[in-house]
Structures are given as structure tokens and as C-alpha cells.
Amino acid sequence: MAGRFSRPVWPGDTLTISIWTYGPNARFQTKRQDGTVVIDRGTASIRS
């Protein structure tokens, strides 16, 4: 799993994670409730 923090996240922030799968890999992005992207360009390998 890898990603890049693009903005700070504070305790109590509500986060929404969007995930897109591509075969054995996934990409993700995390946003605060105001729509600000806080983790961008996330990638993960999925093992079965």
C-alpha cells in the first residue's frame, strides 16, 4: 500500500475513501467531508 498525503488530517475528521480495482491492484483516494483530498494517488496490491 502506498499513497501521498496532500493535506493534513486531524482527529475527529470524517473521511471518505474511494477505491477502484484493476485486477489484482487497487487505487484509492481519501477526502475530508468538505471534499478536500487528503490522500491522493493511493495504490494497493490485493492478495487472495
Image: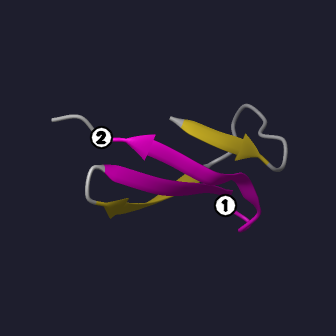
* Disc 1, SS: loop
Left or right: 12 in relation to 8 = left
Decide whether residue 7 is among the magenta residues.
no
Element assignment for label 2 = loop
> Looking at the rendering, which quadrant does residue 8 occupy?
top right
Q: Position of residue 35 (x, y in %)?
A: 71, 68
Residue 17 seen: no
Question: Position of 16 compared to 9: left or right?
Answer: left
Q: Report the residue at 77% width, 40% height from top.
A: 9
Say which of 18 and 26 sits in front.
26
Is residue 41 shown in magenta?
yes
- Can you give x and y, in whole percent of width and height, for residue 13 in the image? 70, 44
Question: Of the numbered discs in the image, which one, if any, rests on residue 46?
Answer: 2
**Residue reaching furthest right?**
7
Q: Seen in the image, is 46 located left or right of residue 15?
A: left
The residue pinned by badge 1 equals 33
- Relative image position of residue 26 (x, y in whole percent): 40, 53
- Of residue 48 and residue 8, the one placed in the foreground of this image is 48
